[in-house]
Amino acid sequence: MRDSLKLLVPALLLAEAFAVQWAGHAERVPAAPELTALPHQIGPWTQSAEFSIDPAVQAQLRADRLLDRSYYSETTGGPASQADLFIAWFNSQSKGDRQPHSPRVCLPGAGWLPESTGAVRIDTPAGELNATRYLVSKGGFRSAVLYWYQTPHRAIAGEWEAKSWILVDALRYHRTDVALVRIVVPSLPGQGQAATDTAAGFARAVYPLLRKAMP
Protein backbone atom coordinates (compact mmCIF):
# COMPACT_ATOMS: atom_id res chain seq x y z
CA MET A 1 0.00 0.00 0.00
CA ARG A 2 2.79 2.43 0.91
CA ASP A 3 4.68 1.56 -2.30
CA SER A 4 1.54 2.30 -4.33
CA LEU A 5 1.22 5.63 -2.57
CA LYS A 6 4.84 6.47 -3.35
CA LEU A 7 4.06 5.97 -7.03
CA LEU A 8 0.68 7.69 -6.94
CA VAL A 9 1.86 10.98 -5.41
CA PRO A 10 4.53 11.77 -8.07
CA ALA A 11 2.11 10.69 -10.81
CA LEU A 12 -0.55 13.05 -9.46
CA LEU A 13 1.91 15.94 -9.22
CA LEU A 14 3.13 15.30 -12.76
CA ALA A 15 -0.41 15.12 -14.12
CA GLU A 16 -1.34 18.31 -12.26
CA ALA A 17 1.69 20.15 -13.63
CA PHE A 18 0.91 19.02 -17.18
CA ALA A 19 -2.79 19.94 -17.01
CA VAL A 20 -2.18 23.30 -15.36
CA GLN A 21 0.59 24.15 -17.81
CA TRP A 22 -1.62 23.18 -20.76
CA ALA A 23 -4.58 25.15 -19.42
CA GLY A 24 -2.39 28.16 -18.74
CA HIS A 25 -2.16 28.92 -22.46
CA ALA A 26 -5.92 29.54 -22.62
CA GLU A 27 -6.68 30.17 -18.98
CA ARG A 28 -9.75 32.24 -18.17
CA VAL A 29 -8.44 34.26 -15.25
CA PRO A 30 -11.46 35.72 -13.43
CA ALA A 31 -11.86 39.19 -12.00
CA ALA A 32 -10.85 39.38 -8.35
CA PRO A 33 -13.69 39.21 -5.80
CA GLU A 34 -14.31 42.14 -3.48
CA LEU A 35 -13.89 40.24 -0.23
CA THR A 36 -14.22 43.40 1.84
CA ALA A 37 -17.81 43.66 0.55
CA LEU A 38 -18.80 40.67 2.68
CA PRO A 39 -21.52 41.81 5.11
CA HIS A 40 -20.65 43.14 8.54
CA GLN A 41 -23.65 41.16 9.83
CA ILE A 42 -23.77 37.44 9.02
CA GLY A 43 -26.72 35.78 10.72
CA PRO A 44 -26.24 36.29 14.48
CA TRP A 45 -22.61 37.28 13.88
CA THR A 46 -21.50 40.93 13.86
CA GLN A 47 -18.11 42.09 12.63
CA SER A 48 -15.99 43.23 15.56
CA ALA A 49 -12.65 43.89 13.86
CA GLU A 50 -10.85 43.88 10.52
CA PHE A 51 -7.13 43.27 10.62
CA SER A 52 -4.51 44.65 8.29
CA ILE A 53 -2.08 42.01 7.07
CA ASP A 54 1.62 42.66 7.45
CA PRO A 55 3.31 43.39 4.09
CA ALA A 56 5.91 40.69 4.79
CA VAL A 57 3.11 38.14 5.29
CA GLN A 58 1.39 39.35 2.11
CA ALA A 59 4.63 38.89 0.19
CA GLN A 60 4.99 35.37 1.55
CA LEU A 61 1.40 34.33 0.83
CA ARG A 62 1.36 35.90 -2.67
CA ALA A 63 -2.44 35.86 -2.74
CA ASP A 64 -4.38 38.18 -5.05
CA ARG A 65 -6.96 38.98 -2.35
CA LEU A 66 -6.74 38.66 1.42
CA LEU A 67 -9.28 39.15 4.19
CA ASP A 68 -8.80 38.81 7.94
CA ARG A 69 -11.85 39.61 10.08
CA SER A 70 -13.26 38.84 13.48
CA TYR A 71 -16.98 38.36 14.17
CA TYR A 72 -18.84 38.29 17.47
CA SER A 73 -22.09 36.61 18.46
CA GLU A 74 -24.07 37.37 21.59
CA THR A 75 -25.95 34.07 21.29
CA THR A 76 -22.87 32.08 22.33
CA GLY A 77 -21.06 32.62 25.60
CA GLY A 78 -17.40 32.55 26.59
CA PRO A 79 -14.49 32.38 24.15
CA ALA A 80 -16.68 30.67 21.53
CA SER A 81 -18.55 33.94 21.00
CA GLN A 82 -15.74 35.01 18.64
CA ALA A 83 -15.01 33.64 15.16
CA ASP A 84 -12.04 34.73 13.08
CA LEU A 85 -12.46 34.52 9.30
CA PHE A 86 -9.38 34.41 7.05
CA ILE A 87 -9.54 34.16 3.25
CA ALA A 88 -6.66 34.00 0.77
CA TRP A 89 -7.78 34.03 -2.89
CA PHE A 90 -5.53 33.17 -5.84
CA ASN A 91 -6.62 34.01 -9.38
CA SER A 92 -4.37 31.37 -10.99
CA GLN A 93 -2.17 28.43 -10.06
CA SER A 94 -0.95 27.83 -13.62
CA LYS A 95 2.65 28.84 -12.92
CA GLY A 96 2.88 26.60 -9.87
CA ASP A 97 4.55 29.20 -7.64
CA ARG A 98 1.37 30.75 -6.21
CA GLN A 99 -0.79 28.36 -4.22
CA PRO A 100 -2.57 28.37 -0.85
CA HIS A 101 -0.40 27.62 2.17
CA SER A 102 -1.84 24.60 3.94
CA PRO A 103 -2.88 25.18 7.57
CA ARG A 104 -1.37 21.75 8.26
CA VAL A 105 1.98 23.48 7.75
CA CYS A 106 1.22 27.07 8.78
CA LEU A 107 -0.38 26.29 12.16
CA PRO A 108 2.52 24.18 13.51
CA GLY A 109 4.91 26.71 11.98
CA ALA A 110 3.26 29.41 14.12
CA GLY A 111 3.60 27.27 17.26
CA TRP A 112 0.10 25.74 17.30
CA LEU A 113 0.15 22.03 18.17
CA PRO A 114 -2.58 19.81 16.70
CA GLU A 115 -4.47 17.80 19.30
CA SER A 116 -6.93 16.13 16.92
CA THR A 117 -8.04 16.41 13.34
CA GLY A 118 -10.74 15.06 11.06
CA ALA A 119 -13.15 15.85 8.24
CA VAL A 120 -16.56 17.45 8.73
CA ARG A 121 -19.57 17.82 6.46
CA ILE A 122 -21.81 20.82 7.01
CA ASP A 123 -25.23 21.23 5.43
CA THR A 124 -25.74 24.81 4.24
CA PRO A 125 -28.38 26.63 2.17
CA ALA A 126 -25.83 26.60 -0.68
CA GLY A 127 -25.20 22.85 -0.50
CA GLU A 128 -22.89 20.56 1.42
CA LEU A 129 -19.64 22.02 2.71
CA ASN A 130 -16.69 19.66 3.20
CA ALA A 131 -14.03 20.99 5.56
CA THR A 132 -11.08 19.87 7.66
CA ARG A 133 -11.33 20.27 11.43
CA TYR A 134 -8.36 20.90 13.70
CA LEU A 135 -8.25 21.25 17.47
CA VAL A 136 -5.00 23.07 18.28
CA SER A 137 -3.24 24.40 21.37
CA LYS A 138 -0.50 26.91 22.04
CA GLY A 139 0.60 27.47 25.60
CA GLY A 140 -2.58 27.93 27.59
CA PHE A 141 -4.69 28.75 24.52
CA ARG A 142 -6.86 26.37 22.53
CA SER A 143 -8.84 26.83 19.33
CA ALA A 144 -11.07 24.93 16.94
CA VAL A 145 -10.08 25.45 13.31
CA LEU A 146 -12.13 24.72 10.20
CA TYR A 147 -10.68 25.22 6.75
CA TRP A 148 -11.45 24.33 3.16
CA TYR A 149 -10.39 25.12 -0.39
CA GLN A 150 -13.12 26.86 -2.36
CA THR A 151 -13.26 26.81 -6.15
CA PRO A 152 -16.00 28.10 -8.46
CA HIS A 153 -17.73 24.71 -8.39
CA ARG A 154 -17.08 23.10 -5.01
CA ALA A 155 -15.65 23.23 -1.51
CA ILE A 156 -12.80 20.79 -0.87
CA ALA A 157 -11.61 19.66 2.55
CA GLY A 158 -8.08 18.33 1.91
CA GLU A 159 -4.92 19.39 0.13
CA TRP A 160 -4.51 16.33 -2.10
CA GLU A 161 -8.15 16.35 -3.10
CA ALA A 162 -7.79 20.03 -4.00
CA LYS A 163 -4.82 19.18 -6.24
CA SER A 164 -6.89 16.50 -7.96
CA TRP A 165 -9.68 18.97 -8.72
CA ILE A 166 -7.17 21.42 -10.22
CA LEU A 167 -6.76 18.86 -13.00
CA VAL A 168 -10.50 18.73 -13.62
CA ASP A 169 -11.07 22.49 -13.53
CA ALA A 170 -8.00 23.26 -15.63
CA LEU A 171 -9.05 20.84 -18.36
CA ARG A 172 -12.79 21.47 -18.29
CA TYR A 173 -13.07 25.17 -17.46
CA HIS A 174 -9.56 26.55 -18.13
CA ARG A 175 -9.57 27.96 -14.61
CA THR A 176 -7.32 27.26 -11.63
CA ASP A 177 -8.46 29.97 -9.19
CA VAL A 178 -8.98 28.91 -5.59
CA ALA A 179 -9.53 30.39 -2.13
CA LEU A 180 -8.33 29.04 1.18
CA VAL A 181 -11.02 29.77 3.78
CA ARG A 182 -10.18 29.35 7.46
CA ILE A 183 -12.35 29.86 10.54
CA VAL A 184 -10.89 29.90 14.05
CA VAL A 185 -12.97 29.80 17.24
CA PRO A 186 -11.25 30.00 20.67
CA SER A 187 -11.92 27.13 23.05
CA LEU A 188 -11.62 26.33 26.73
CA PRO A 189 -10.08 23.00 27.85
CA GLY A 190 -12.57 20.20 27.39
CA GLN A 191 -14.84 22.32 25.18
CA GLY A 192 -13.32 21.54 21.80
CA GLN A 193 -16.53 20.04 20.45
CA ALA A 194 -18.56 23.09 21.48
CA ALA A 195 -16.05 25.36 19.74
CA THR A 196 -16.16 23.11 16.67
CA ASP A 197 -19.95 23.33 16.60
CA THR A 198 -19.74 27.11 16.81
CA ALA A 199 -17.22 27.21 13.95
CA ALA A 200 -19.50 24.95 11.90
CA GLY A 201 -22.45 27.25 12.60
CA PHE A 202 -20.48 30.26 11.40
CA ALA A 203 -19.32 28.33 8.32
CA ARG A 204 -22.94 27.42 7.59
CA ALA A 205 -23.85 31.12 7.58
CA VAL A 206 -20.85 32.44 5.64
CA TYR A 207 -20.51 29.74 2.96
CA PRO A 208 -23.54 30.83 0.86
CA LEU A 209 -22.17 34.39 0.86
CA LEU A 210 -18.79 33.19 -0.33
CA ARG A 211 -20.43 31.18 -3.12
CA LYS A 212 -21.96 34.44 -4.37
CA ALA A 213 -18.83 36.54 -3.84
CA MET A 214 -16.36 34.20 -5.52
CA PRO A 215 -16.18 34.49 -9.33
Image (cartoon, grey):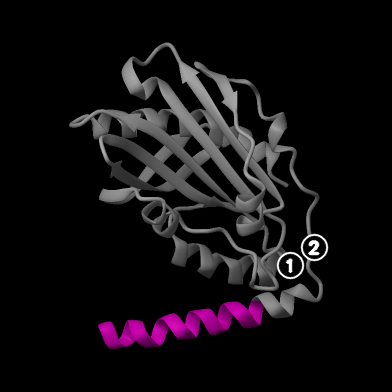
Q: Is residue 167 above or below residue 40?
A: below
Would residue 68 be visible to someone looking at this image? Answer: yes
The quarter of the displayed image where residue 79 is located = top left
Q: Is residue 200 above or below residue 58?
A: above
Residue 1, position as x, y percentages in the image = 25, 83
Q: Is residue 17 magenta?
A: yes
Label 1 belongs to which residue? 174
- Tag 1: Cα neighbours inside 10 Å, few (<14), some, or many (≥20)? many
Q: What is the number of the mark on residue 28?
A: 2
What's the residue type where badge 1 is placed?
His
Residue 123, position as x, y percentages in the image = 43, 36
Q: What is the number of the mark on residue 195?
A: none
The quarter of the displayed image where residue 196 is located = top left
Left or right position of 187 against 166: left
Magenta residues? 1-19
- Hey, which residue is sitting farthest top in the picture? 74
What's the residue type where badge 2 is placed?
Arg
The quarter of the displayed image where residue 33 is located = top right
